[in-house]
Image (cartoon, grey):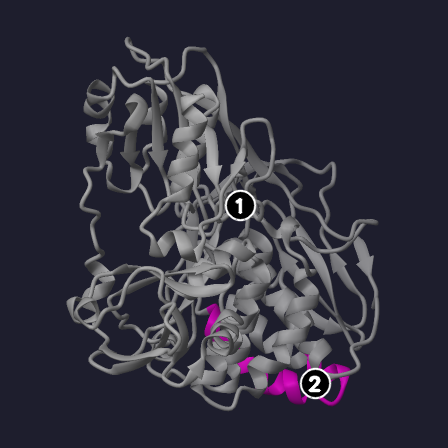
């Protein structure tokens, strides 16, 4: 039997709450009862928080923690003021035991093993001389019941956009724990996540209304530096605006530049690609960008620009937006347009065919308009082209494998290295270790080559709009035939996405798998890097020129 004494004293409410978060999170994802018993672990915390926050002595503090633990009805999990006893593995008569482990937030299993007669437990110092012991394993029932974990689904608590302080504390706890245990790119964060949690917890508590609370959640998630991490709620939809105008913007030469005009009214008013948005509803564009960017998580600066441009003109459905445009004329142009959610789903389609032959017998394929089912026919159509340009400047389907079979000649070619957190034991300091984590690992390989291989050179156009699945397509093209990337760096954000729900009806998404180049090189927070760097200019956009495509044709024509 081991003995654990006090490590340090908790001197204030903040320390007690951080210790409680560590205990609550450890139980939420490692106590086997939470895998299959109908225990409302959220309610256990909510009910105990007032007493935990107001405790004036170690005894009151221990009693409040004990109230929370009482919801488990487990004598092996308890708290008390003073030293506690844990039950380590021993050489006693082994019996079948099981522990709860996770391959991501939504995929968990019971792992069985031989263990000591008593349950495996872990001690957690709570400060103020209070210590807790938590069960981490249990005997496998003789009748085999509850053999498969069935965790309870997240509750949205959407009845109020501005939940009580207890539920806001729960939100902070849950966000910290899920990201700590399940976010794949935690090692690439600029700030220590535990330090971030300590700094934002008071903001969750002090949030004076629904908007400030929702913005606090969004601001917290920006510390992930992950463009696939997002925070969605009705409150934030109102803040950013859910209805766009029929204009597409890009950040060009550090200015918000119109690159597509889908609204017929805007076209009638003379709005053209290359016009610069100088003000929105009287607000300077630069200030508006800064105001919105602070609540958006982004892997790279170029990705942040794309995320902001997608929201910059948004507002409420049917509202009118006043724009000040610089068109190249001496005087700015003032225009008013109507916002509509229809513009979010009806994007302007280029007049040119998505698959065609360009000058110098070079093929062109718009990957953003290519379906997986049409890949074979595309290669048949372009089989006589001396080279092909793949345009990946936007979202694509999962095209990588279908494209690679027509380009690769070699067996056993690695495409990506995929890893992710494997949550086996609590990540708690102890035994001389500050942290302890595990991960799963596998290497994706190219599919077997097709009977007919395209032998010409290929290039892929990329920029900040190349993200997620489009970047993964780029990795397949890179591995298949060393396709040349031309343009500017991609978003630097890919991997499988998972999500969880916080009180107030807030959904948080994050990346749960780490995807790297087949040689181990980073993609996240870097992006696909072009061998030919070509940034568009405002003058070229106004002239209707596509500079990256021009460079690709020149590159492939050599």
Q: Residue at x 28, y 8 (%)?
A: 451
Q: Tell me the crowding category of disc 1: few under 14, some 14 to 19, or many 20 or more residues within 10 angstroms, Cα based.
A: many
Q: Report how many numbered discs are placed on residues in the image.
A: 2
In the orientation shown, which residue stands out farthest toward the front? 330
Whether residue 226 can be seen here: no
Relative depth, front residue between 531 and 197:
531
Mark number, residue 60: 2
**Residue 378 rendering spot, x and y as whole percentages:** 22, 25
In the orientation shown, which residue stands out farthest toward the top? 451
Q: In which quarter of the image is residue 247?
A: bottom left
Residue 57 lies in the magenta stretch: yes
Q: Residue at x 56, y 69 (%)?
A: 220
Relative depth, front residue between 352 and 71:
352
Query: Would residue 421 be found to the left or right of residue 6 on screen?
Result: left
Answer above or below: position of 523 versus 510: above
User: Element type at marker 2?
Assistant: helix
Camera-side mark, 1 or 2 = 1
Q: Which residue is drawn at 32% across and 36% down?
A: 398
Answer above or below: position of 131 versus 354: below
Answer above or below: position of 547 versus 34: above
The residue under label 1 is 101
Relative depth, front residue between 123 and 216:
216
> Which quadrant of the rendered structure holds the C terminus?
top left
Give the extent of the magenta segment: 41-62
**Residue 155 rendering spot, x and y as whole percentages:** 37, 69
Query: Would residue 115 be found to the left or right of residue 362 on screen?
Result: right
Mark number, residue 161: none
**Residue 337 rendering spot, x and y as whole percentages:** 23, 77
User: Element type at marker 1?
Assistant: strand
Residue contact between numbered discs 1 and 2, judged by CB atoms under 8 Å: no
Q: Tell me the crowding category of disc 2: few under 14, some 14 to 19, or many 20 or more residues within 10 angstroms, Cα based.
A: some
């Amino acid at each position: 039997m081991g003995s654990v004494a006090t490590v340090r004293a908790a001197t204030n409410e903040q320390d007690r709450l951080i210790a409680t978060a560590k205990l609550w999170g450890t139980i939420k994802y490692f106590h086997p009862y939470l895998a299959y018993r109908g225990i409302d672990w959220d309610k256990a915390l909510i009910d105990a928080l007032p007493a935990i926050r107001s405790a004036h002595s170690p005894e009151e503090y221990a009693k409040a923690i004990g109230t929370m633990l009482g919801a488990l009805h487990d004598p092996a999990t308890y708290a008390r003021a003073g030293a506690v006893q844990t039950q380590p593995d021993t050489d006693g008569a082994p019996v079948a035991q099981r522990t709860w482990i996770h391959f991501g937030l939504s995929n968990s299993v019971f792992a069985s093993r031989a263990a000591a007669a008593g349950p495996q437990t872990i001690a957690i110092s709570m400060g103020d001389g209070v210590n807790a012991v938590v069960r981490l394993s249990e005997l496998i029932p003789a009748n085999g019941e509850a053999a498969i974990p069935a965790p309870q689904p997240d509750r949205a608590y959407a009845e109020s956009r501005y939940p009580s302080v207890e539920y806001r504390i729960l939100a902070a706890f849950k966000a910290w724990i899920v990201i700590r245990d399940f976010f794949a790119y935690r090692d690439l964060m600029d700030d220590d996540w535990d330090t971030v949690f300590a700094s934002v917890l008071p903001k969750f508590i002090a949030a004076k209304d629904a908007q400030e609370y929702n913005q606090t959640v969004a601001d917290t998630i920006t510390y992930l530096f992950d463009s696939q991490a997002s925070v969605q709620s009705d409150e934030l939809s109102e803040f950013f605006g859910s209805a766009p105008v029929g204009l597409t913007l890009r950040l060009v030469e550090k200015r918000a530049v119109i690159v597509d005009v889908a609204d017929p009214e805007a076209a009638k008013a003379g709005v053209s690609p290359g016009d610069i948005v100088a003000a929105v509803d009287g607000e300077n564009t630069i200030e508006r960008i800064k105001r919105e960017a602070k609540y958006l998580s982004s892997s790279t600066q170029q990705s942040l620009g794309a995320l902001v441009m997608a929201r910059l003109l948004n507002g409420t459905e049917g509202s009118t937006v006043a724009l000040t445009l610089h068109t190249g004329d001496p005087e700015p142009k003032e225009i008013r347009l109507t916002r509509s959610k229809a513009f979010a789903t009806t994007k302007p389609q280029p007049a040119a065919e998505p698959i065609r032959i360009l000058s110098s017998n070079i093929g062109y394929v718009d990957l953003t308009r290519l379906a997986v089912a049409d890949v074979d026919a595309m290669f048949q159509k372009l089989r006589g082209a001396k080279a092909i340009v793949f345009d990946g400047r936007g979202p694509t389907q999962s095209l990588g494998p279908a494209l690679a079979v027509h380009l690769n000649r070699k067996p056993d070619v690695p495409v990506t290295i995929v890893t992710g957190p494997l949550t086996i034991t609590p990540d708690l300091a102890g035994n001389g270790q500050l942290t302890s984590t595990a991960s799963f690992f596998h290497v994706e390989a190219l599919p077997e080559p097709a009977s007919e291989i395209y032998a010409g050179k290929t290039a892929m156009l990329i920029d900040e709009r190349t993200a997620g699945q489009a970047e993964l397509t780029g990795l397949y093209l890179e591995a298949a035939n060393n396709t040349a990337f031309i343009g500017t760096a991609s978003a630097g954000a890919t991997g499988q996405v998972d999500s969880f729900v916080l009180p107030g009806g807030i959904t948080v998404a994050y990346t749960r798998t780490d995807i790297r180049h087949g040689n181990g090189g980073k993609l996240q927070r870097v992006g696909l890097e072009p061998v030919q760097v070509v940034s568009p200019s405002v003058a070229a956009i106004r002239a209707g020129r596509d500079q990256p495509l021009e460079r690709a044709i020149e590159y492939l024509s050599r």
